[in-house]
Image (cartoon, grey):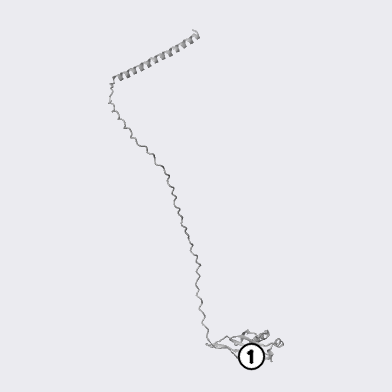
Amino acid sequence: MSYAQRKELSGNRTLSIVFTVVVVGSLMYALVTGLAFNVIKKSVENLKTFDVEQPPPPPEKPPPPPKETPQVPPPPMTPPAVVQPPIVQQPIVTVQAPPVLPPLQPVIAPPAPPPPPPAKVTRAQSARGSLQGLFTGDDYPADALRDEATGTVVARLTIGTDGRVSSCDIVSSSGNRSLDSTTCRVLRSRARYTPAKLSNGQPTGDTDTARIVWRLQ
């Protein structure tokens, strides 16, 4: 047997096997499905079924016809009145700052006044009597002689506790400067007083008024 014939026989055998498997499978499927169908059909026939008839429901009554209501037109719409809310003015609150008080100064009691001095018992007195007698013709100023000046000088003298004139002030002038200045110069250098004394006997200062007349001889 040649190789070609051997190959052809092998192919025909394969086809035969496949065809046989398909036919056997189809017969088995038909057998199984047919038996199952018969079993189910027989079971259904054995069931005794019956229909329960229910009475039909009573017919519904038709609803009564609606009553005819007269058509009333709606009332006219009036727009609501616009109410303006009242304007409430906020009260103006004025807050005043408390006054600034100056710092308290410590109160210092004034010092007690000194006790009054003892009253004068005696006033100062010129030791030489009249003050006019202290002046001589030689005291006349040369320029006043040349101008023939005359007059009266009134001077206030301050007398110290030693009885000497400590100051001289012109109260009323003679009209000539030389006569005025010569008056105070002579009184400061020549006038001597007994000092004034207090009630306790202590010497004290005093004042006196001198009136000096200048005239040509």
Looking at the image, is 10 positioned above or below residue 59? above
Where's residue 176, x and y in %?
A: 67, 85
Q: Quadrant of residue 157 in the image?
A: bottom right
Looking at the image, is 56 positioned above or below residue 165? above
On the picture, is 199 further left or further right than 166? Answer: left
Looking at the image, is 105 positioned above or below residue 202? above
Q: Amino acid at mark 1?
A: Gln
What secondary structure is marked by label 1? helix
Q: Quadrant of residue 170 in the image?
A: bottom right
Where's residue 161, x and y in %?
A: 58, 86
**Residue located 45% across and 12% down the image:** 15
Looking at the image, is 31 positioned above or below residue 81? above
Q: Quadrant of the C terminus?
A: bottom right
> Which residue is under mark 1?
132
Foreground pick, 87 / 204: 87
Foreground pick, 173 / 128: 173
Give the total of numbered labels: 1
**Residue located 65% across and 89% down the image:** 213
> Dot 1: few (<14), some (14–19), or many (≥20) neighbours within 10 Å?
some
Most extreme residue toward the right is 146
Where's residue 214, x and y in %?
A: 66, 89
Most extreme residue toward the top is 1
**Residue located 39% across and 15% down the image:** 26
**Residue located 34% across and 18% down the image:** 37
Foreground pick, 119 / 64: 64
Where's residue 36, x and y in %?
A: 34, 18
